[in-house]
Image (cartoon, rainbow, N blue to C red):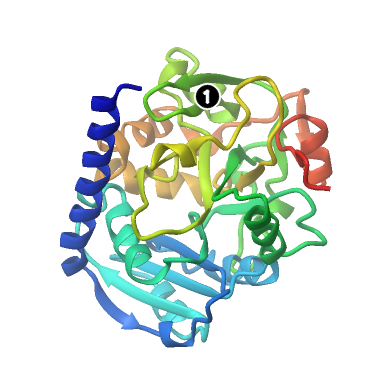
Amino acid sequence: MSIFGSYLLRLERKRWRWRAFRKRRELSVVRNRTKAIRPDDILLFCTFRNEDVRLPYFFDYYRKLGVNHFFMVDNGSSDDGRAYAAAQDDVSIWRTDAGYGRARYGMDWLTWLQMRYAHGHWTLTVDVDEFFVYPFCDTRPLAALGDWLDASDIRSFGALILDMYPEGPVNAAVYERGMDPLTIANWFDTGNYTISLNKRMRNLWIQGGPRARMFFADQPEKAPALNKVPFVKWNRRYTYVSSTHMILPRGLNLVYDQQGGEKTSGALLHAKLMNTFGERVAEEAARGEHYRAGHEYERYADGAANERDLWTKWSAQYLNWRQLEGFGLISRGNWA
């Protein structure tokens, strides 16, 4: 990239940070327990709306993985999720009724909180329906992954979004509060992924999986992006650009070896496709607050998403991270 191109990226990063600083006024504190955070704590950042049914397992999963403190932003929930989150001793929570789309799909709010509280910490930025897995996650907590990345002078860690779905119609997989969603939606596509290079941001753009083949078969280039950089040793100068798909400085996007080798990487098991999907699709398509004014959710709504059977004879039932490594979806790289 030219010197001028690099200069433009620095300006873009400053613009996003300044925007997040201004958007801080949209946040009202519900519970702030950040004084309890220790220097080596691992922090999780998440925006949510009407997720009371999912929050108990979400917190439990990430506590077991090694998260020490949760930063939650409630965007206008009408259920009991905010109260439940606020009652948790390891949660700091803010609320806002401002537009999700106008806040860069929640990233402006999280960027402000990361600027203020996350400097020097390993941070995990995920959605409530995403569950992070990585090599040795069954025996090594997030702190061990962070220590190894620190020792290797690596500041960011990539993950493939792996859409999980049931065997049979989506609406037949009935989710109940506190349940592990992977007990009812535990199948995934082992292939069917395309990769292209974003030269400007230096990241690999990954698409495919069940949503691409079922809802975007006629326009695969518009299918949801499946590449994310969720685990980062945060510096207050950093900022995500498009959800957690890209980040600045752009060197943090080099989470895959683009010369044919392997770098250590993980996956985000995306447990969206179950009976709650149809109601959420209808709500978000009407709100138009998501990317491209909710175009993705309009696709799901047009396709009667809740009645679809995404399972095929090529689907695989999820077992563990070693299985994902065997399919080439994650890699341990040189982390032994």
Q: Residue, x 82% and y 46% (percent of image)?
A: 319
- Identify the residue shown where x is 64% and y is 41%: 164
Quarter of the image for residue 219 reads top left
Residue 49 percent location from the top left of the image:
37, 61
Q: Specify the farthest residue to the top.
A: 218
Q: Name the residue located 27 percent from the left edge and 40 percent from the top edge.
A: 10
Please name the residue shown 40% across and 61% down the image: 48
Residue nearest the viewer, comparing 116 with 305 = 116
Q: Where does the N terminus fall, quadrant-wise?
A: top left
The percent position of residue 154, horizontal first and vertical second, equals 59, 48
**What secondary structure is found at the residue carrying circle 1?**
helix
240 vs 293, left or right, is right
Instruction: State left or right for residue 288 relative to residue 64.
Output: left
Which image quadrant for residue 74?
Answer: bottom left
- Viewer-proximal residue, 272 or 71? 71
Residue 220 at x, y = what percent?
Answer: 47, 17
Q: Which x, y percent locates residue 217?
A: 50, 16
Assess disc 1: are there few (<14), some (14-19) or many (≥20) residues with their C-alpha within 10 Å of its C-alpha. Answer: many
Q: Is residue 284 left or right of residue 127?
A: left
Q: Report which residue position mark 1 lands on.
A: 212
> Is 204 drawn above or below residue 119 in the view shown?
above
Q: From the viewer's side, name the closer residue of 118 and 128.
A: 118
Q: As drawn, which residue projects farthest toward the front?
A: 3
Instruction: Please state which amino acid type lies under the numbered disc 1.
Output: Ala
Number of disc labels: 1
